[in-house]
Image (cartoon, helix red, strand yellow):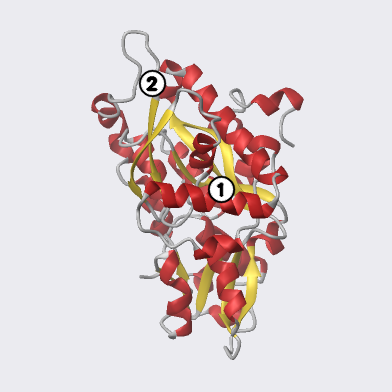
Amino acid sequence: MRFHRSALATVLAGALLVTSALSGCGKASSAADGKQATELRYQGWVGQVTLPELAADLGYLGDVKLKWIGNTISGPQDIQAATTGDIDFGGAFNGAIVKLAASKAPIKAVVAYYGANKDTYNGFYVLNDSPIKSARDLIGKKIGVNTLGAHAEAITKTYLARNGLTDDEIKQVELVVVPPVNTEQSLRQGQIDVASLSGVLRDKAVARGGVRSLYSDYELLGEFSAGSYVLRQDFIKKNPDTVRTFVTGVAKAIEWSRTTPRAEVIARFEKIIKARGRNEDTSTLQFFKSYGVAGQGGLISDKEFATWIDWLDRAGELKGKQVSAADIYTNEFNPFAANGAAK
């Protein structure tokens, strides 16, 4: 699986059918007869507690209930499912959202949910004895990522370009899709040369030893919110109160996780995961530090989309399409917007 321009286009699968798909999907939770939705369908992540799940457990969603329909390992897949109406909200890397928005998909980002800081970041690791020391050493090598067309790919291309590799040389760096829970093992077994690791999976791998960091999103870009939750615009129009409750709940959950002692946050996560009864391993929760969201309460700023609009445009991915950061997101439903827009 070579690293082609078409890799980022995977996020657009089905996007051309969005209009027809929306006419027949999502009826179960869309407003009818003036009534707003009280149930939001979503996809989760194995062994993790998402911000909406935390918000629900803390009582921040009021009468709005969450309906789990399965798990995902891919942000692009998650927002695609939201676009076609299979779920009501989905989250992904902001660059993937830009690509979807460029295709005229009727979505809107409403709150940030993950990002990078000194404690929480996406790192790219090699084995201690690996001969890979620099960006140029990655030519012809394999990098394990959770999905194509998303965060890990964008960060990798940014790292390679900043270190002087040409477009042709960058195409020789191979991205291999590996489930996150298997990425560390794949690196240690020599199936890949570099592993993209984040969150508790990264910390657990580092704690075991034998690996070293090559680059990270935090080193490249500093603190920033990297991904947002999106909803369909028709859903927002029909269910403004539900959307406000959802965004407010997520925003409050972000701040709760920031201000609550770490041990208490982890204990809450363990309780949530055990209560849902999916036979999940909770040992990795001990490594949780933060969600990494930059803006207060998940407020979104122009730069968090403009950065990737510029990058995708330079890479030729937008094919001349004009995309405005301000058109992709809104802070309208976030109670922290009253304190001033995210900077």
Position in image of residue 185 (x %, y %)? 44, 78
Residue at 65% across, 25% down: 335
Please name whichever residue, 168 or 121, is drawn nearer the observer in this view of the structure: 121
Q: Quadrant of the N terminus?
A: bottom left
Query: Three-letter amino acid code at disc 1?
Result: Arg
At 59% from the left and 85% from the top, the residue drawn is: 210
Q: Residue at x 74, y 37 (%)?
A: 343
Q: Which residue is mark 1?
A: 268
26 to 112, vertically: above or below:
above
Amino acid type at mark 2:
Ala
The answer to whether residue 2 is seen in the rendering is: yes
- Mark 2 burial class by Cα count in 10 Å: few <14, some 14-19, many 20+: many
- Residue plotted at (33% across, 25% down): 29
User: Which of these two is toward me, 271 or 95?
Assistant: 271
* Image spot of residue 59 (x, y percent): 54, 31
Identify the disc placed on residue 37.
2
Q: Is residue 3 visible?
A: no
Relative to 160, is 16 on the left or the right?
left
Q: Kindly indicate the quadrant of the structure image that contains residue 83.
A: top left
181 on left or right of 332: left
Picture layout, residue 34 above or below residue 114: above
Select label 2 or label 1 by which is in front.
1
Label 1, secondary structure: give it: helix
Residue 117 point in image, percent of width and height: 70, 55
- Disc 1 crowd rating (10 Å Cα; few below 14, some 14-19, many 20+) is some
Secondary structure beneath disc 2? Answer: loop
